[in-house]
Image (cartoon, rainbow, N blue to C red):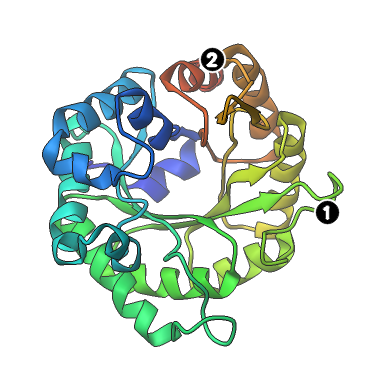
Amino acid sequence: MNPKNLLTELKNRPLLCDGAMGTQLFLSGLAPGDCGMLWNVMQPEIVESIHRRYREAGCELLTANSFSGCVTNLERHDLVGRADELNRAAAEVARRASNDSAWVLADIGPFGGFLEPLGEMKPEDLLKLFVQQGESLKEGGADAALIETMTDPAEVVVAVKAMKRAGDWPVIATYAFDRGDGKNYRTMMGATVEQAMGEAVAAGADVVGANCGTAMDLDDYARLAEQLVKAAGNTPVIIQPNAGAPRNVGGRDIYPATPAEMGALAPRLLAAGARIIGGCCGTSPDHLRAMGEVLRKAKAS
């Protein structure tokens, strides 16, 4: 475990989170449609090498390979009975790569459906599923929980409560936003920035913000960061942009932003007031290294 307190450290200086895991796994040979979490036990050396490259790039927060670790997602791969094993292994692999000098984040993604009344999942049932996932990740050595790529504030509320039950650790909650008109960003479920941040903070999240987005370019993420900080009040903000808005080339999404362009975005995110910056879809250790240079220069000055 990282001996330093994440929230205390965050008060003293901004931190660098890592970038995409999924695209790195695909580049390493994971076939589309296969369960990436299986690699935590079948090819852990590859997952660990991805974490290590992010750590070597300067990332201080490593996100466990557990995004799809809720049993509702694992059910699609007939892996419900291995949920605890795969989540625990995700944290253990990231823990090894961290050398206890970075914080390991337990990655909690959406459960893949809708809560009542739009869907059939009851909040109390989802709470139990998220607690189960969080406890396994905590057992594996995670230092904090990262609830990410959410679109429904009601699901975020359930997830935050679940992570608070799963362990005595910081809880980070982030949403994916749609570009809309480029000024009034909303989640797929229609939540405004103010509503999304307000409900996450009220539920008890220690850090709030955004990761990912639909049709969002780098300027959009800079504007979104300003809105997030304003809406979050005194709660620290994290933002993890995609490497620009993707273009579909030959059936594949290609993210156009270069490491240099992501590096140029970093000071704008920090100037907006973000306390944790990182990357999401399409970003690599090279992108994060470029962003980290900004933090290192700021620390030196």
Residue nearest the observer in this picture, 288 or 181: 181
Badge 2, how many Cα within 10 Å: few under 14, some, many 20+?
few
Q: Which residue is mark 2?
A: 297
Looking at the picture, which amino acid does disc 1 mark? Asn
Q: CA distance from mark 1 to mark 2?
A: 33 Å
Residue 135 in the image, given as x and y percentages of width and height: 21, 65
User: Which residue type carries mark 2?
Assistant: Lys
Query: Is residue 181 shown left or right of residue 193?
Result: right
Which secondary structure lies at badge 2? helix
Q: Is residue 60 above or below residue 74?
A: above
Element at label 1: loop
Left or right of residue 281: residue 182: right
Q: Residue furthest top?
A: 260
Residue 234 in the figure: left or right of residue 132: right
Q: Residue at x 70, y 68 (%)?
A: 195
Residue under label 1: 184
Q: Which mark is residue 60?
A: none
Image point (44%, 82%), residue name: 121
Residue 76 place in picture, x, y as percent: 32, 61
